[in-house]
Amino acid sequence: MVSTSVALAVTVVTVLAFTAVGLFAARGRVHTVEDFISARDSAGRGTLTATVIASMMGAWILFSPGEAGAAFGGLPAILGYAIGGAIPLLLFIPVGARIRAVMPAGHSLTEFAYARFGHGMYVFVLIVSVFYMFIFLAAEMTGIARALSLVAGVPLWQTAGLIGGFVLIYTVYGGLVASILTDTIQTLVILPLLAIGFAGALFALGGTGEIHTAAATADPVLLDPTFRPGLEFGVYVAFAIIGANMLNQGMWQRVYAADSDTTLRHGFGFAALVVIPMVLLAGLFGVAAAALGLTEPGTASIAFFLVLEEAFPTWVTLLVVILAILLVMSSADTMFNAIASVVTADLARLLNDPPQRTLWISGRVLTVSIAIGAVLIGSQGFSVLELFLTADLLAAAVFVPFLAGLYTERLSGPGAMTASVLGMVIGIAYFPFLRGPLLAIPGMDVILPEPSFLLAFVGATVVSALFTALVTVLGDAQIDLDTIDRDIRALDEPGTDGINQPSEGEP
Amino acid sequence: MMGPGGFWLITWGAIALVLIAFLYLVWALLTKET
């Protein structure tokens, strides 16, 4: 095991270095609230690819794919996980171009929900989206705190506090600009660390031949691409990831950050291709752990670290600690700014053009509040898997009617909401994690079907999609998509934070 | 069941793709955005 003080020192040096990069990169570039929450048309294809990869690939890849490989179905489970991770990024190619065409001056997905569907669907999308993003953030803090506790015995609160605190410093100062620029450098470090780390593990464990032989002997289904439970896991996790990411404001911000539609296609397309081998590699650690008999019931989620302990010398473990910290920092800054941007953009409308100072203070106070909440949850070491899957389920029910609003003028707000609610009802009826509370309602035990993750996620998406198609064909809401952008408020008056100079007459 | 050749290919293929992605990003950042 790495000593606690060495791990803490590595953590401090890493977070300090990237905080300095974030502060330096944003210096003199954030003049307005618009700059703080939007980086419109500023990212070329390299930057966009890197920031999309960094935002999506958090510390979760060190836990969940390995767990899938070790406990949920071996190769087909991790292949489904990997492909499921790529699909939303590929979907963002046409959907992102459409978002930019329908609402070129927009900032957030909730702005679109309000302008396109009205109050009801707006509240729905706001709750589901912010719930998902906050759970993602809390899961990241929990993940890194657990990781450092496992490899070096670092107390949970110290890890969560250190990383959350330093990411907060550069995110509050530099907003989205700092997030995107640090993401770029973090990705350039993460990719070789992951590849070299896994190649090193392979050599240390005796090569692919040794692992294959061990897996074939220990549990042949680990290597069976047609193993049904693995395939089912792959399918439902794909649905879960797609819905959640389509309602991820961090991705919407990066759609607007692309400097052209061509960059958008290249950036999201290439990021999708990179996500597949990244998740696959992380998942293969789980297969290796199970094959070598390193996992026991209850330890599958730390399969990655069990292999690490078995195969790696201390200095390589420290490299993985850096990898884990960078994965968390790059996702956490995205989520801090994404949640703050949703609320800041909405405040501009709800308060009917408040002074810039109000928006500045609100955006930053919100970022600090979100960070404190995430650090507090992360330092408790809770299992957030159930909350994560619940947030994913809600998103799976909402994303089809929500995105359909980009393409059809016939779908009404109540129609989209009804479709989402129907999807949720079906999803919740099958969802294993909500079975307890549902059975407390008298008579439910008779009507509830057998619980199934697959039917919950696929059912939520398919039923909401079918109802969306039905109300689109039967109804005609006569929404004029050409006028959506008219309701969007620009937020580009200079700020008043003492760093960025206020404009004349600004309060 | 996947054979040892398939397992070798999927493992080293993934490692190679991650490294290629790294090189592409370096190239894209140096040539397209400077």
Image (tube, grey):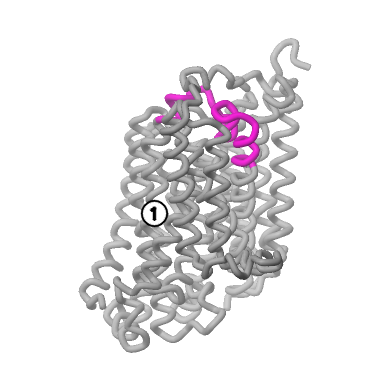
Q: Is residue A115 above or below residue A309?
A: above
Residue numbers of the magenta segment: A98-126
Taking A155 as reference, is A337 left or right?
left
**Magenta region's main secondary structure?**
helix
**Placement of A13 over or under A398, stated as above or below:** below
Picture coordinates of residue A294, whole percent (x, y) = 47, 84
The extreme top residue here reads A505
A261 horizontally vs A153: left or right? left
Residue drawn where x is 49% and y is 41% of the image: A251
Whether residue A195 is visible? no
Residue B17, image x, y percentages: 30, 56
Furthest toward the bottom, the residue is: A217
Residue A108 on the magenta segment: yes
What quarter of the picture does the N terminus of chain A occupy? bottom right
Q: Nearer the viewer, residue B20 or B5?
A: B5
In the image, residue A188 above or below residue A77? above
Task: Name the residue at 27% across, 80% down.
Answer: A209
Residue A354: x and y, percent?
74, 21
Q: Quadrant of residue A231?
A: bottom left
Amino acid at pointer 1: Val
Q: Quadrant of residue A385?
A: bottom right
Report the front residue among A477 and B28. Answer: A477
For mark 1, name the chain: A
- Identify the secondary structure beneath mark 1: helix
Could you classify mark 1 by the number of other residues whose Cα lies within 10 Å: few (under 14), some (14-19), or many (20 or more)?
many
**Residue on which the image places disc 1:** A275
Q: Quadrant of residue A70?
A: bottom left
Q: Left or right: A170 with respect to A101?
A: right
A182 vs A472, left or right, is right
Quadrant occupied by the C terminus of chain A: top right
Q: Residue at x 66, y 49 (%)?
A: A166
